[in-house]
Amino acid sequence: MELSNPSIPANSAHSINPKDVVEQVKLFVGAYGLDKGKAMFESVSSLMSFLPWWDAEVKIPVYTYFKDERERQQREQDEKDLQKARASAPQQPIFISQPQAMQGVTMPFVDGANINQMNIMESGANVTYSQPSQT
């Protein structure tokens, strides 16, 4: 087949650079979203798959990009869901049950040191200390 206009070189200005195609797909996905970008690529891929280099130089890198982008979006969504769950969880007071002690705890390894009983009230914020009884 002869060129209709021999003054236009066949392989210089009209050739397709695979890296440019991959970059254009990435730009399209960034502008319109992953689903629309993937649909657009599928339609272009069905037209361009006759090129011998299409699968190795365009299709595989673009599908790898789609996979990475989908994983990134899923991580972001999971992080948002976790933040929502943490924010909506009711803040329950923490109750600490402590045995009654009439006398403080003696520490024999420190010369006569005594640790007095500590009572934590229901709110968790009020802390009272009691002295051991002197009997």
Image: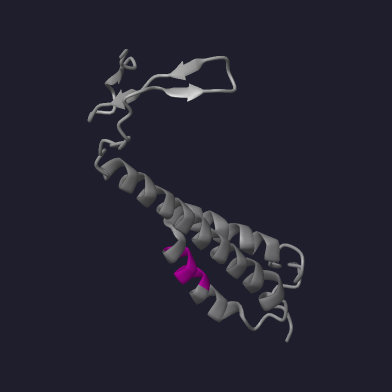
Q: Is residue 64 magenta?
A: no
| Residue 52: percent from left, percent from top | 72, 81
Residue at the image position 60 percent from the left and 78 percent from the top: 48
Range shown magenta:
36-41
Q: Quadrant of the C terminus?
A: top left
Q: Going by the image, does 12 lie left or right of 101? A: right
Q: Quadrant of the N terminus?
A: bottom right
| Residue 83: percent from left, percent from top | 37, 44
Q: Which is the main secondary structure of the residues drawn in magenta?
A: helix
Q: Is residue 39 magenta?
A: yes
Residue at the image position 75 percent from the left and 71 percent from the top: 10
Residue at the image position 74 percent from the left and 83 percent from the top: 2
83 over 18 or under it: above or below: above
Closer to the camera, 50 or 100? Answer: 100
Closer to the camera, 15 or 87? Answer: 87
Q: Residue furthest bottom?
A: 1
| Residue 40: percent from left, percent from top | 47, 69
Residue 52 seen in this snapshot: yes
